[in-house]
Amino acid sequence: MEKKNIDWGNIGFGYMPTDYRYVSMYRNGAWDEGVLTSDPNITLNECACVLQYAQTCFEGLKAYTTEDGHIVTFRPDLNGERMENSAKGLEMPPFPKERFVEAVAKVVEANAAYVPPYGSGASLYIRPYMFGFDSVIGVKPAKEYQFRIFTTPVGPYFKGGAKPITIRVSDFDRAAPHGTGHIKAGLNYAMSLHAIVDAHEKGFDENIYLDPKTRTKIEETGGANVIFITRDGKLITPKSPSILPSITRRSILQVARDYLGMETEEREILLDEVKDFAECGLCGTAAVISPVGKIVDHGKEICFPSGMEKMGPVIQKLYDTLTGIQMGHIKAPEGWIKVIK
């Protein structure tokens, strides 16, 4: 299929509508067969549950063109599994993960002309989401739901290379103990908006949140999990029941062990021990790994030896290996890459 006439090397990380999106409705206790539609608009009643009580969850993944010309996605089954868990946590009917993967494949194939060519640094971002559809005025779950997937081509998250960022220890809480921090609910991100705007106004790139109970342990940032590299080359990442289980982080841990021979550990990490680490990164779908050069704790700077000019050497290896797997340069573990076209 001929690609769209887009300046692939200069698109940003924003929304550009494509030709098709996937829609399925849940009514009378069952999901319908689902369809592809060219209509990007949603018509809702003013009393729709999603508008009144924010009953919505979402996912994010990407499609790539590999070196051999195939269009692929990266571990979509895990996104489907996580969305099932998110739906259960919000009293929504799970959209079955097998159907989730099929729907992702359908909408990507239908928009194949928008999948950026290999070597452009761009990709097709895929956004599955689900929301309470019918009118609800009492505080209770909806009875009808809509599941949708749209796609949009996006440029590289970092134009000109990934420069280390500066993040601050936030006074805000990201999630409550025993709350919804472990699911990908829209309400979690709404809660982070004031904190991120405040951080940007004060010259920081992102917030890092502490556990709300003791405020002594590292959790995650507003939109990404955190990884640390110790001075002896070990990868450690925070463990907490209120952290979103990042698919990128899970993949990085396996890459570290199986491809780079590193020791890895998931455990509680105290803020007090961060000063002893060699490197830090934020991991997620958008950027894969964002290097962190400095964490500021209420005026006290924690500067990592890897510096503010480039990725640290270990995080660079992790980034190169994982993106190499995604792009087809490096053989992937069984089941990681789904070929769509």
Image (spheres, rainbow, N blue to C red):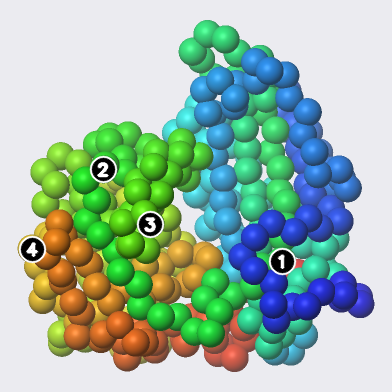
The span from disc 4 to disc 1 (Cα, nearest Å) is: 41 Å
Precedes in sequence: disc 2 or disc 3: 2
Which residue position holds label 1?
153
| Crowd around label 2: few <14 · some 14–19 · many ≥20 (10 Å) | some
Q: Are marks 3 and 4 in contact (CB under 8 Å)?
A: no
Q: Nearer the viewer, residue 274 or 267?
A: 274
Distance in Å between CA atoms under marks 1 and 2 = 33 Å
Residue under label 2 = 172
Q: Tell me which amino acid carries mark 2.
A: Phe
Tell which of 179 and 335 is nearer to you: 179
> Closer to us: mark 3 or mark 4?
3
Report the amino acid beneath label 1: Pro
- Mark closer to the chain start, 3 or 4: 3
**According to the image, label 4 marks what residue?**
272
Q: Position of residue 28 (x, y in %)?
A: 72, 19
Of pointers 3 and 1, the one earlier in the residue sequence:
1
